Image (cartoon, rainbow, N blue to C red):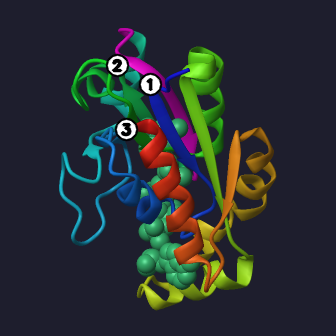
Amino acid sequence: MSFSIVIFQGPSASGKSTLQARLGLPRIVTWTSREPRPGEQDGREYHFTTREQMERMHQQGQMLEINEYRGNLYGTSLQSLEQAGEQGQARSSVMEAQGAKLVKQLLGERALLIGISASREQLERRLAERNVSMEEQQFRMASFDEEMAALSQCDLIIRNDDGQLHTAEAIIDCLRAGLG
Ligand SMILES: Nc1nc2c(ncn2[C@@H]2O[C@H](COP(=O)(O)OP(=O)(O)O)[C@@H](O)[C@H]2O)c(=O)[nH]1
Ligand SMILES: Nc1ncnc2c1ncn2[C@@H]1O[C@H](COP(=O)(O)OP(=O)(O)O)[C@@H](O)[C@H]1O
């Protein structure tokens, strides 16, 4: 069996982007209506756009999935899915739980859902170390319980607690060898 898409899900700061980069598959750049954060570039972290534009794209059938998360829309366009890599090559994406569930329903066994977990205390500390404001930290932690509960829908859950990064990376390296 071969996977078309590998999706990382889990709470904020659990290490989804870090492990996605480690996997090394072409990354799908998704769309969001949220404001870019300092240092983020349009077309690199996300395609930044308006809520109206995303809703229009959705109505026109251009989106694989679209979901509201913490007050903003996030979604994967069919075009960005096609553009991410060569035909037949698996791609990777990071999604919140509802979107990941939808893609799994749509693509079935062609989608591999990898959940990343870590404790609440550790995630709060990681966010604090990233110079995120207190308000933003609370905002991002608001979905912690929901994201942790939704790990049960994953095909595989990788623990990425403090001190576990090497093990988590070693698991990803095994997957990379298998996907290559
Ligand atoms: N459903 C869905 N979720 C997405 C998509 N792109 C990003 N996300 C998720 O939206 C959530 C919020 O992302 P972001 O605003 O970057 O904040 P952070 O990951 O908490 O720092 C994360 O769980 C992302 O993985 C997408 O195309 N569809
Ligand atoms: N096992 C770990 N122990 C300590 N810090 C980690 C670990 N894994 C990731 N980090 C750090 O936590 C922060 C959040 O990681 P990131 O991959 O951006 O998370 P996410 O994409 O889930 O929001 C980064 O600064 C990253 O270097």
Q: Which residues are magenta?
A: 60-70
Which circle marks residue 180 in the picture?
Answer: 3
Q: What's under tag 1, amino acid-wise?
A: Ser
Main SS, magenta region, reads: strand
* Image-based side of 7 in relation to 79, left or right: right
Q: Residues within 10 Å of mark 1 (few under 14, many from 20)?
A: some
Q: State the separation of the CA atoms marked 1 and 2.
A: 13 Å
Which circle marks residue 4 in the picture?
Answer: 1
Q: Identify the element where label 1 is drawn.
A: loop
Choose the circle earlier in sequence order: 1 or 2: 1
- Residue at (66, 77) in percent of width and height: 161
Mark 1 against mark 2, which lies toward the viewer? 1
Q: State the separation of the CA atoms marked 2 and 3.
A: 23 Å
Q: Residues within 10 Å of mark 2 (few under 14, many from 20)?
A: some
Is 65 magenta? The answer is yes
Is 61 magenta? The answer is yes
Which circle marks residue 120 in the picture?
Answer: none
